[in-house]
Amino acid sequence: MEHAIYLVTLVGTALVVAAAFSSLIAFRFGAPLLLLFLCIGLATGTDGLGIEFDNARIAYFAGSLALAVILFDSGFGTPLNALRQAAGPALSLATFGVLLTTGLFGAAAYYLLDLSWLESFLLGAAVASTDAAAVFFLLRAGEINLRERVRSTLEVESGTNDPIAIFLTITLVEVIAAHANPETNVLVTNLILGFLVNMGLGAVVGALGGLAIVRLVDRLNLDHGLLPIFVLTLSLMVFAAAGAIGGSGFLAVYIAGLIAGNSDIRAVTILKRFQDGMSWLAQIIMFLILGLFATPSQFPAIMVPAIALGLFLMFVARPIAVWLCLIPFRLPRPEVAFVSWVGLRGAVSILLAITPLLGGLENGRTIFNAAFIIVLVSLVIQGWTVGPLARRLGLIVPARLGPLDKVELELPGSAHHELLAYRVAHGSPVARGERIPRWARPSLVLRDGRSMRFQDMGRLAAGDQVYIFVPDRYPRLLDKLFASRAVVDPEDADFFGAFAVDPARSGAELEAAYAPGLTEAEQKLTVGALVTARLGGHAEYADRVLIGSIELIVRDVDDKGRITGLGLSFEPTAPVARVPVFLSAGEMGDRLGAFIRNWRKPTETQEAAAQAEDAPKPPVEKATTGS
């Protein structure tokens, strides 16, 4: 028994270490890291090194706990401004998008695999949701600097669509396991009622649990080493409590993380660091276990139809669902195209594909193997092409800040305050003589191994280490002051225009200087308000507005979304790659209006010509010649 404990511990830790080392390969060659985790599990499983693991209940239990940890961390790291910005499109994709994808994919699976209609829709529900772990890794750890609106939409969607897919999958498994053949209207009614109850209870428990976590953390004077474990345990308690009363535990734990992360919770820096590490560990464990559970020798039997279904999901089902869900929102076509492509499938789909095995379904193993192959296809094709496609569609923007060396410390007894340690970077505003705000006066400065008061140091120099005691919700201004200038690629050297424009100047001055053709109403606005209005009321970093012969580029916005910096270019950038589909409702309206105007012009021209012909002609005097 003792030998077995050592052996199991040795093998388990060796797998985790191998997965951690594989991250170096992923970052070096741009490989999808989660794909490497799966491959390590496959290589050490039954058909690899021979480790036998065929316990579906343990795999599902471990995967569910790992997913709960990941979702809590996802919610904790999602700021409210991102949620407000992307709530409409993301929630539409997380609800109707999952249903549409399930239906379209299920219809294709029925004809490509030897499954019944309900089993086909079950497979569709299992692979309908985007994987939060895969999306968060690619967008955050992959350092893809996307436009904020696109990033927020993808992150919020991936964090909120799992509960809907889980509910659909479990419900269909129960219906098939009961050998029921309900009528369509009865099944739809039961699904709707069950969905409302499941999601409603999950949302209520999650909101109450999030508020309770914040209150307990602030009231209890726990040691900093125990506090992160306490919060993680409370989040799992919220997950379990919601599931025990018939609600969605996954939605509950995500909402609890969202509320806790956006409140003035104590020791937020320590919690973020701990949860980041736990989220990595949860991803590694989940992918390794699911890889161990799979049996690759069974894949060839359904390899061809499963790959075809994976391609159908990427190129047909997901794009159609995304396009239909985003029609009401005026999103540019490149953004809609990118959202439809970054519908990565991952561990959640494999985890849901285990439920048919738990339910004892006859074709449970076929559904699991098909879902596993579909996930592999998604990670290989989509995971490797996210960055190039974002550049192709013009969605990559230059970094707002350059290198920044900062350490956040939380001192005992300093509620809602932090001690920040900055190292002054070369080329930073502080190194160039920019003043530090009065509310953030440095307490200590280290230079050449000597510690001195800030008042005795004079002007800060590159390499100085500065300690500043500030509230934990300090503005981003400090980061901007101590960061060096962002390095811009040569091809992006003119990204923000050759000239700077003061957003507070009037539109009349812009019209007088460059004559872009502004209306009288627009000339009364400030340039910043004009750009915001042209962008539909919301401006974000790197947005561009073409006005006549000039192009205005948003260089920076403040915490409230107000434009603080604008650039002007006389040579507008070349249009990004055209996407032939994905028209939004706004674009449809614009094109319909243009069609009607162009259709009426010939008619009006013909009518005017006809009226001219019918009008009485003036008498024509004959020319006379003198005799």
Image: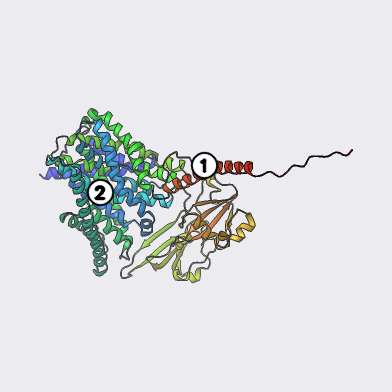
Where is mark 2, residue-wise?
Answer: 164
Identify the residue shown where x is 60% and y is 61%. 508
Q: Residues within 10 Å of mark 1 (few under 14, many from 20)?
A: few
State the image coordinates of residue 251 (x, y, percent, origin top left). Answer: 25, 54
120, 16: nearer the viewer: 120
Residue 226 visible in the picture:
no
Under mark 2, the amino acid is: Ile
322, 275: nearer the viewer: 322
- Horizontally, residue 419 falls left or right of residue 285, namely right
Residue 494 visible in the picture:
yes
Label 1 residue SS:
helix
Identify the residue shown where x is 63% and y is 54%. 514
Where is mark 1, residue-wise?
Answer: 599
- Horizontally, residue 552 falls left or right of residue 75, namely right
State the image coordinates of residue 179 (x, y, percent, origin top left). Answer: 12, 39
Q: Residues within 10 Å of mark 2 (few under 14, many from 20)?
A: many
Label 2 residue SS:
helix
Identify the residue shown where x is 52% and y is 42%. 599
State the image coordinates of residue 149 (x, y, percent, origin top left). Answer: 41, 52
Instruction: Looking at the image, tell me whether mark 1 or mark 2 is earlier in sequence order.
Output: 2
Residue 446: name its quadrant: bottom left
State the image coordinates of residue 177 (x, y, percent, origin top left). Answer: 13, 41
Quadrant in which the N terminus is drawn: top left
Under mark 1, the amino acid is: Trp
511, 232: nearer the viewer: 511
Quadrant in which the C terminus is drawn: top right
Residue 84: name its quadrant: bottom left
- Which label number is shown at residue 255? none
